[in-house]
């Protein structure tokens, strides 16, 4: 035992979360003592690391404090959510537009971003070596434009799916020799769904096969009508490799920005969005942020999702040190606890302690929410949400094998709209359901209907992780019937029983810990822990249960394939005998 403190007269007030150093200060002992004490409890903490009240209390008692002397500071109600202050219109001033480049693969998005950057970014004093930091700014006719340097709608929509709209204007790159392709159509849907104006950049116009008119014609089929065709979408012919048309493109951006009147209030604590972030060996977590409102300053305490931190140092895309950054400025900052994700929103708060309280509270609320919530729209619960007035629109992303069926289904679905709920198809295309579709559904809180089309494995995973409802159909009327029923609240899920495999019991063991174990031989299929079980004797069902454990020799295993022996622990049934057959199965949604 070391240094038992003697200040026992006053109660010690501790906040819900504090750093090791703050605890040391509160107890009047050195931080090192606290660290040593934490280590005896198996907690490795650095001096600036945060610990919670309970841990702090244990350590304090360890160090000779009486538990009755420790008080949890009353928690001041804190704003934990991301609601932004609504700025008084008189405080708003013009800010640079934020531009993202979208389009089909290989149509030249990266080349265009590179050309704009290398030809237009003013060389910095440090020699003008621009590093890739996820965003940069250029000046045209005295006006600044911010470019997000991650092309494609994946990043764009990932941000929206997290509730952050970073982009004001979308540049839709279409290769003049290739025309409108599937990802061009996707990009249009993503931009339109986000309500972001489009400027068309017809790229590769240097190529002999370039056919800009064909591109414009094709775009009309996707409701993008360029000026020459009587619409109001600006289209510019460019060549990223020959660096032609770049001035015209920048002018077009300024024009659209003028119409859009993008504004923000620079005179308040900043809010921003994470463009990209990574862990650097020498600098720790480094994040590129785009300031959206207010002014971000060196020394500001910040909260990013469930991460707190402090702006220790701030740089622009040229690597120059900044002390402050106003709206639409991309900055690279150091000083976060860990690496945040792209699209997460950043808020400046009064001080670091409040920042930590906010992240603790957010974590607590998320955990509570995860117990109860399934926030995403789902056909099964649709009617309840409509009745509760929570849902006014059913947003659908439709994928079909051929264009004809996509159009037929689209028309029929739209006719299902009623006064209570509108059916809105925000994207319809041919081909498999891909990541982009799932992200769009996430961002727009929609469902995906796949008619005679497959689901890409990665899209399937993503949908499962994010709770996006993807339904597959091969008969049009069934699809329509399901949606109609869901809208009317009559949707009843139907399950099919799918058999995974069989095992034959060869010997029954008794274990004091696990009860009866069926020593078995897998005769067909693959059996898995967690599957449902049906036990039969001479074809007669004896009972049902669940596979609670699988053992190969002494090892617990997840699954066992045909031709292998194993021990099976069955939950819910133990009257099995040698010679009985165990069927393994699971339920799969049929509709
Ligand atoms: P991204 O997938 O949309 O980012 O496309 P990239 O920028 O990687 O470009 C794909 C290919 O098209 C590369 O080989 C580029 O060199 C080429 N490319 C891009 N822009 C132009 C252009 O304006 N003219 C020509 N001829 N080729 C281009």
Image (tube, helix red, strand yellow):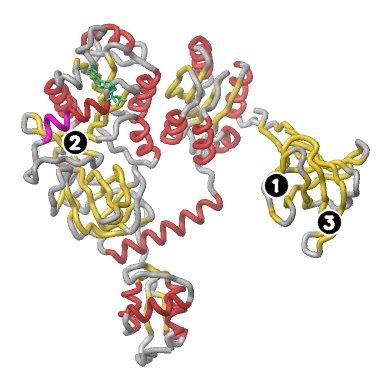
**Does label 1 or label 2 sit earlier along the sequence?**
2
Q: Which residue shows up at 27% across the image and 23% down it?
A: 108
Q: Which residue is mark 2?
A: 146
* Residue 61 placement, left or right of 584: left
Going from N to C along the chain, the mark reached first, 1 or 3, is 3
Residue 573 in the image, given as x and y percentages of width and height? 83, 51
Residue of label 1: 529
Real-space Cα distance between discs 1 and 2?
53 Å
List the single residue furthest toward the right.
538
Mark 1–mark 3 CB contact (< 8 Å) = no
Give the position of the N terminus as an image quadrant.
Answer: bottom left
Residue 377 in view, yes or no: no
Residue 315 x %, y %: 17, 49
- On the rendering, which quadrant does ligand 1 occupy? top left
Q: Which mark is residue 575?
A: none
Could you say which quadrant of the image residue 103 lies in? top left
Whether label 2 touches label 3, CB < 8 Å: no
Q: In the image, which residues are magenta?
A: 116-121
The residue at the point 35 percent across, 24 percent down is 187
Q: How would you rate the neighbour count of disc 2 (Cα within 10 Å): few for under 14, some for 14-19, many for 20 or more?
A: many
**Quadrant for the C terminus in the image:** top right
**How many numbered tags mark residues here?**
3
Q: Tag 2, which secondary structure? A: strand
Residue at 29% across, 34% down: 150
- Does ligand 1 reach within 8 Å of label 3's beta carbon? no
> In this rendering, would 83 be left or right of 582?
left
**Can you identify the residue that label 3 sits on?**
516
User: Cα distance, mark 1 to mark 3?
Assistant: 16 Å
Whether residue 154 is visible to the viewer of this picture, yes or no, is yes
| Left or right, residue 240 beside residue 529 | left
The mark closer to the camera, 1 or 2, is 1
Specify the principal SS of the magenta part: helix
């Amino acid at each position: 035992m070391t240094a038992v403190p003697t200040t026992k007269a006053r109660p010690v007030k501790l906040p819900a979360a504090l750093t090791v150093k703050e605890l040391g200060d509160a107890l009047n002992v050195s931080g090192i003592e606290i660290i040593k004490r934490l280590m005896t409890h198996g907690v490795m903490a650095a001096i600036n690391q945060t610990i919670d009240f309970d841990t702090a209390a244990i350590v304090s008692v360890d160090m000779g404090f009486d538990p009755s002397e420790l008080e949890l500071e009353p928690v001041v109600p804190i704003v934990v959510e991301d609601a932004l202050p609504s700025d008084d219109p008189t405080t708003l001033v013009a800010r640079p537009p934020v531009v993202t480049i979208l389009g089909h693969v290989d149509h030249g998005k990266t080349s265009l971003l590179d050309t704009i950057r290398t030809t237009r970014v003013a060389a910095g004093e440090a020699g003008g070596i621009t590093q890739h930091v996820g965003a940069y700014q250029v000046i045209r006719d005295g006006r600044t434009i911010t470019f997000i340097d991650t092309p494609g709608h994946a990043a764009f929509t990932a941000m929206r799916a997290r509730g952050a709209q970073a982009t004001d204007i979308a540049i839709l790159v279409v290769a003049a020799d290739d025309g409108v392709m599937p990802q061009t159509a996707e990009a249009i849907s993503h931009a339109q769904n986000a309500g972001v104006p489009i400027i068309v950049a017809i790229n590769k116009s240097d190529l002999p096969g370039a056919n800009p008119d064909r591109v414009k014609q094709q775009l009309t089929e996707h409701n993008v009508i360029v000026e020459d065709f009587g619409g109001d979408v600006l289209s510019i012919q460019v060549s990223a490799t020959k660096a032609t048309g770049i001035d015209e493109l920048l002018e077009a951006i300024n024009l659209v920005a003028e119409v859009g009147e993008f504004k923000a209030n620079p005179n308040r604590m900043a809010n921003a969005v994470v463009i990209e972030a990574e862990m650097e060996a020498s600098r720790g977590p480094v994040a590129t942020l785009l300031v959206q409102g207010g002014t971000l300053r060196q020394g500001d305490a910040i909260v990013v999702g469930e991460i707190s931190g402090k702006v220790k140092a701030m740089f622009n895309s040229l690597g120059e040190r900044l002390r402050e950054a106003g709206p639409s400025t991309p900055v690279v900052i150091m000083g976060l606890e860990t690496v945040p994700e792209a699209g997460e929103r950043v808020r400046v708060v009064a001080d670091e302690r409040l920042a930590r309280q906010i992240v603790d509270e957010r974590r607590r609320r998320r955990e509570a929410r995860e117990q109860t919530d399934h926030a995403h729209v789902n056909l099964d619960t649709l009617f309840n949400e409509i009745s509760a007035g929570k849902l006014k629109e059913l947003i659908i992303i439709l994928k079909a094998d051929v264009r004809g069926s996509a159009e037929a289904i689209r028309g029929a679905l739209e006719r299902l709209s009623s006064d209570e709920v509108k059916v809105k198809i925000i994207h319809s295309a041919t081909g498999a359901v891909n990541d982009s579709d799932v992200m769009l559904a996430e961002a727009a809180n929609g469902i995906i209907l796949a008619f005679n089309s497959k689901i890409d494995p990665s899209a399937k995973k993503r949908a499962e992780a994010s709770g996006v409802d993807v339904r597959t159909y091969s008969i049009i009327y069934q699809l329509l019937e399901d949606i109609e029923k869901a809208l009317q609240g009559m949707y009843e899920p139907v399950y099919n029983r799918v058999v995974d495999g069989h095992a034959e019991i060869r010997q029954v063991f008794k274990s004091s810990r696990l009860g009866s174990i069926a020593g078995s031989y897998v005769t067909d299929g693959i059996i898995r822990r967690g599957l449902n079980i049906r036990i039969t004797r001479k074809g007669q069902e004896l009972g049902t249960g669940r596979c609670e454990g699988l053992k190969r020799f002494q090892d617990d295993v997840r699954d066992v394939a045909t031709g292998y022996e194993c021990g099976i622990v069955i939950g819910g049934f133990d009257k099995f005998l040698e010679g009985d057959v165990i069927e393994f199965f699971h339920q799969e949604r049929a509709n």
